[in-house]
Image (cartoon, grey):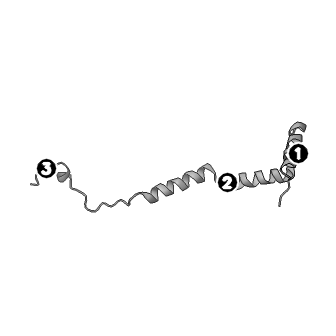
Amino acid sequence: MKNITVSLPEDVYRRARIRAAEQNTSVSAMVRRFLIEAGTAETDFERRRRLQDQVLAALPRFSARGRLTRDQVHDRALR
C-alpha cells in the first residue's frame, strides 16, 4: 500500500474532520474511500466501449447472400 501526503487549507481540513466524526470515521479513511472509488470507476472511454459493444452485439449480422443484381434493383428487363 502506498502513502500520500495532501496539503489542505486549515478550514477545509477542519470541515473534513467534522464530517468524518459525523460519519464515525477518519479523514484518512474518507480520502482512501474517495480515491478507491475514483480509481476503480469505469472511465468514459470504457463506458463508451462497453456501450458500443452492446450495440454491435444487438445488430443483426450482415450477409451479402441473396442480394439483388443491379438490373433487379432498377427493375430492368434482363437482356
Q: Residue at x 86, y 40 (%)?
A: 15
Q: Residue at x 83, y 54 (%)?
A: 29
Question: Residue 5, can we see it?
Answer: no
Provide the secondary structure element on which disc 3 rests.
Answer: loop
| Residue type, mark 1 in image | Arg
| Residue type, mark 3 in image | Arg
Whichever of labels 1 and 2 marks the residue nearer the N terminus, that label is: 1
| Residue type, mark 2 in image | Ala
Q: Residues within 10 Å of mark 2 (few under 14, many from 20)?
A: few
**Between residues 8 and 13, which one lies in front from this camera angle?**
13
Where in the figure is residue 65, as x and y percent of width and height?
A: 28, 62
Q: Tell me if 36 is positioned left or right of 11 in this view.
A: left
Q: CA distance from mark 2 to mark 3?
A: 58 Å
Give the label on residue 32, or none. Answer: none
**Is there CB contact under 8 Å for labels 1 and 2?**
no
Q: Tell me if 59 is positioned left or right of 73 in this view.
A: right
Whichever of labels 2 and 3 marks the residue nearer the N terminus, that label is: 2
Give the label on residue 41, or none. Answer: 2
Give the position of the C terminus as an image quadrant: bottom left
Relative to 29, say whether 15 is above or below: above
Q: CA distance from mark 1 to mark 2?
A: 25 Å
Where in the figure is residue 48, as x and y percent of width and height?
A: 55, 51
**Between residues 70 and 40, which one lies in front from this camera angle?**
40
In this figure, which residue is indicated by the disc labeled 1? 17
In this figure, which residue is indicated by the disc labeled 3? 76
- Among all residues in the image, which is located at the extreme left? 79
Q: CA distance from mark 1 to mark 3?
A: 82 Å
Where in the figure is residue 59, as x and y percent of width and height?
A: 41, 57
Q: Residues within 10 Å of mark 1 (few under 14, many from 20)?
A: some
